[in-house]
Image (spheres, grey):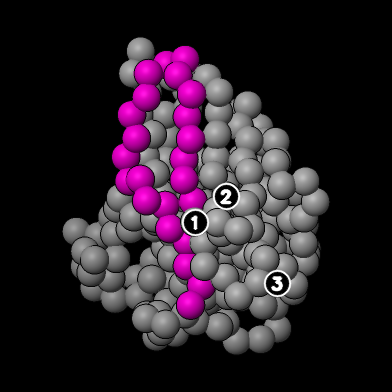
């Protein structure tokens, strides 16, 4: 299994600013994922972060808006840039320890943009 | 295209009644299948998963799910619902090889009446 922590747990931000969300795992993992859950909606994958390479973004998400860092096998950050109220969501980090394993999710970061 | 359908957006049951949440998937091959639960203000918790073998899988909190290949379904069941089961339930599919993202259904919100 994997235990994941995220910081901050929640934040209220002003339009036009940026927020960086941190994701820390208690073990080394190859693949980390960032999901967005808009109010009342399901989870949508933003990007896949593999240590040592550029993140792979899903359709509709771009690096300029959601830059991701993956400096080592236990840590990743997601930045939400130039925020607007439409970015108000829960952002979740998850890890996939290995093929055939389940994904483990962090507690999420609840972001409100005013 | 890969997709997951949860046809019931909201379900309300009485405490003690049985429960079945439906999940249908579209996938190129037999995928890995998951049910996650999200309680209000909480992260995602894995209820159960199907990778291979016995098509009836047991999970935590008294839940079970049955994989039916012919119907492309993975319905979640519980014989007697408790008030604490009120939450959002998500069905998800993932590839059976490598490190792959999960595709989530829209979710089913369960309300439990006393």
Q: Nearer the viewer, residue A100 or B77?
A: B77
Q: Nearer the viewer, mark 3 or mark 1?
A: 1
Circles 2, 1 touching at the beta carbon (< 8 Å): yes
Quarter holding residue A41: bottom left
Q: Which residue is mark 3?
A: B99
Say if the magenta span includes residue A50: no
Residue at screen point 63% across, 26% down? B62
Residue B24 - label: 1
Q: Nearer the viewer, residue A21 or B64?
A: B64
Q: Which residues are magenta?
A: B1-23
Q: How many labels sit on residues?
A: 3
Q: In x, y percent, where is residue B104?
A: 48, 59
Mark 2 or 3, nearer chain start: 2
Cα–Cα gap, marks 2 and 1: 6 Å
Quadrant (top left/top right/bottom left/bottom right) for the C terminus of chain B: top left
Residue B74 - label: 2
Disc 1: host chain: B
Classed neighbour count for the residue bearing mark 1: other residues with Cα under 10 Å, few (<14), some (14–19), many (≥20): many
Classed neighbour count for the residue bearing mark 2: other residues with Cα under 10 Å, few (<14), some (14–19), many (≥20): many
């Amino acid at each position: 299994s994997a235990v994941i922590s995220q910081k901050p747990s929640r934040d209220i931000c002003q339009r036009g600013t940026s927020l960086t969300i941190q994701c820390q795992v208690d073990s080394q993992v190859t693949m980390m994922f960032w999901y967005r859950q808009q109010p009342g909606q399901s989870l949508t994958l933003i990007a896949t972060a593999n240590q040592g390479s550029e993140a792979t973004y899903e359709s509709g998400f771009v690096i300029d808006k959601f830059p991701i860092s993956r400096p080592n096998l236990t840590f990743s950050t997601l930045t939400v840039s130039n925020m607007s109220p439409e970015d108000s969501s829960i952002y979740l980090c998850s890890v996939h320890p290995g093929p055939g394993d389940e994904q483990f999710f962090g507690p999420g970061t609840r972001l409100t943009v005013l | 295209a890969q997709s997951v359908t949860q046809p019931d957006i909201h379900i309300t049951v009485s405490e003690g009644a049985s429960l079945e949440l439906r999940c249908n998937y579209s996938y190129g091959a037999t995928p890995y299948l998951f049910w996650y639960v999200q309680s209000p203000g909480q992260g995602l918790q894995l209820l159960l998963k199907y990778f291979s073998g016995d098509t009836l899988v047991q999970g935590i909190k008294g839940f079970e799910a049955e994989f039916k290949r012919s119907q492309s379904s993975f319905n979640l069941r519980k014989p007697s619902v408790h008030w604490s089961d009120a939450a959002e339930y998500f069905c998800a599919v993932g590839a059976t090889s490598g490190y792959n993202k999960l595709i989530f259904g829209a979710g089913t919100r369960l309300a439990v009446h006393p």
